[in-house]
Structure formats: structure tokens, C-alpha cells
Image (tube, rainbow, N blue to C red):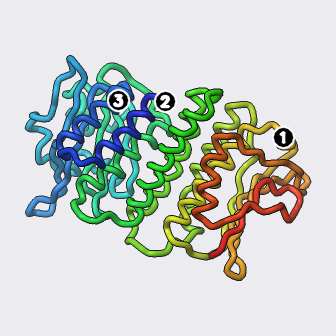
Amino acid sequence: MARVLEKVLKAHQDLLSESPPGEAIREALGKVGQAAQVDRVYVFQNHTSPSGVVCTSHRFEWAASGVPREIDNETLQNLPLRESGYGRWLDSFLENKPVFGNICDFPAPEQPILEAQQIKSLLILPIFAGGELWGFVGFDDCTSQREWSAPEINLLFSLTIVLDTVFSGAPLPASESVTLELIAFIGRMRDIHVAMFSSCSEQELAERTCARISSLVQAYRFFSTRPPAPQVRVKDLFEAVQPFFRTLRDESTALGVPLPPLELRVDDFSLPLARTLNLILTVTEVLAILGQSRELARSATTLSISLMAKQRQGELAICVDDERRQATAGTFAPDGMAFLILRPLRERLNAVEAPPTSPGQMFRLVFPL
């Protein structure tokens, strides 16, 4: 995962550089493909025929040594998606959802074209440009079947955001530009951490960095299928990202430090996009720290995340309740990795970390609305 992370962050930088787009795309696909240990990476562009049929065509490709290239395959040009048996894919793309798995498990109508390319497993991620479905990027494993993990999917999904920049040919909506800026910020913080904290393992740093990027990817998927708006309804976004927060809990269980079930309580208020994403990153970081802490009471049954708005002041609080529905004591102690992220996030929110106002509060942040 560490190697894939490094190449994905480098691809973000390269694709936003001044080099010719086509050359940068092919080079980025190759670097990410090699790191992800896949045999083929490609980009397809969608278009609508005069009769209104959604078709797709192969535009860019990288293939590993010895793997047949498919970019000149006429079958993959002007391919009508739904009519060729890929309606499931198109429906998923329109909701900005991935398609992935082993080909033998796919519906029968989808298998012939894929098997003809010697694909055993694949991951397909939709690309949106200018708020519209532009096409998709795909990753083929022609060697063996594989399980695509959620962190791996989210990390590769972040590539579609920067590809939006390359293909849109117009100023980016705030959702994409702010997300890309925050991913770049995460990359810079990772580099600083490598230079300052040599005691941290490469794998741990990669996992924490992937979690940060994953939270932004979930938010981006929420924004990409909605009309642009200057303000974000915070409740809607946090409810959309809540399943990702639960994956952090599952990962903590695997580490032997199980977090209690998550409960989300969010008042109905709106904030500018950038500030809302800063809150998402803050919660991600706090949950990652709590997921490594052994100070939580074993009787804890609920970990509540609350976002409240009162008299032009917002409050983010994370609290643990025990099995008697009472708050249980605990402390939040950020490590060096978390400190590097949380301090600039507080500054961006113009927030201060405040003392707890009730027993069981592990973390409390107040900020102006």
C-alpha cells in the first residue's frame, strides 16, 4: 500500500504539471499500474450517439511487459455500454460508484469481451468532468483473481479527481479544486512526517495517509453527482461519509482495540465547502487516534460524533458512553502524525480545542460559523 500511495500522490503532481496532457496521463497510468501490481491501466471516454445511445471508446493505455495492448482493439471503440451488456456499469458510474471483482463472478453478458482480453479481475472507476460523467479508468489483473480492498479502491479513486482537471478543459467546481488542494496538503504533511518522525513505520504512515485521502474521496463522490453550491448542508455530507467512519472502527477492531459502535448527531446547518471538508478530515484523524488507544473503557458501548450550531458558534464533540448509558472518562492524546494534521486543520477552521463540558468527552472543538 505504501508504494501505491507514493505513486498516486506523484501522479497527482505530474497530471497537474505543465507537461503535455497525453504524455503525462500515460506516464502516470504506468507508474500507478506498476505500483498496484496490475497488468493494464486504461482510460475510456464516453459519448452519446446521434440516436441517444451512450457509447465508450478506448483513449489511453498502459500495459505491463508481455501483456497484449488493447487500445487498437476495434471492439473497444464506440462500444454501446447498455446495449453491449454493461448497463450495470453505466448505472454504477452515474452514481459515481466503482465496479470491481473477479470476472468469473460477473453477470454472464459482461464476461465475453472481458475474457477476450484475458482479464481475470478488474477495478473500474468513473471519471466526472465538469459535473458530468466523462468516462472511466480501469485496472486489469490478467494474471490472477484478487480481492480489491476498500483503502486500495479509495486511493485509486482519488486519481479520477485529478483526471477531472485534465479532461474538463474548464475551471473546476469548488468540490474538485478544494479536494485536490487538501490531497496535496495531506501529501505535504506525509513528507514532513517522514523527515521528522523516523520512528513511525512506513506501513502505519501509509495506512493513516490512505485514511485521510479516503475520507476526501467519499466526500467527493457525494459532491460529484450534485449541482454546485456555495454552502454545504453539513448533516447531508456527514451522513454520506458515515459508512467510511465505520470502516475506521472495523480497522481498529482488527488491531485489537475495538471502537464502540458509532452514533452520528448533526444539527441542520450549512458551511462553506472547504470548512466542511476540514471537519471531515478532523473527525477522521481523531477516530484513527482513538482506534489505536487502549484507554477506552471496555464497557464503552457508543462512540458519538456530534456537530452542533448555536449562536453562530459550531462545536464538534466526540464522546464515549458506557453500557449504563453514562459517559465514561478518557483522554485524547494525538501522536506526532496527528499533530501535524490537526494543527493546520484547526487554523483553517479558525477553531480552538476546548475543555470537555461533560464526562466522556474525548475531543471538543469550537469554531465560528
Q: Secondary structure at mark 2?
A: helix
Q: Which residue is mark 2?
A: 2
Q: Are marks 3 and 1 in contact (CB under 8 Å)?
A: no
User: For the residue marked with disc 1, what is the amino acid?
Assistant: Glu
Q: Nearer the viewer, mark 3 or mark 2?
A: 2
Residue located beneath label 1 in the image: 295
Residue 30 marker: none
Q: Is residue 288 above or below residue 140?
A: below
| Quadrant of the image occupied by residue 230 | bottom left
Q: Which residue bears the numbered disc 3?
A: 121
Q: Position of residue 36 (x, y in %)?
A: 38, 29
| Residue farthest to the bottom, as pictured | 311
Q: Where is the C terminus found, in terms of image quarters?
A: bottom right
Residue 139's place in the image compared with 90, above or below, is: above
State whether residue 88 appears in this view: no
Considering the numbered disc 1 on the image, is that residue within a helix, a strand or a loop?
loop
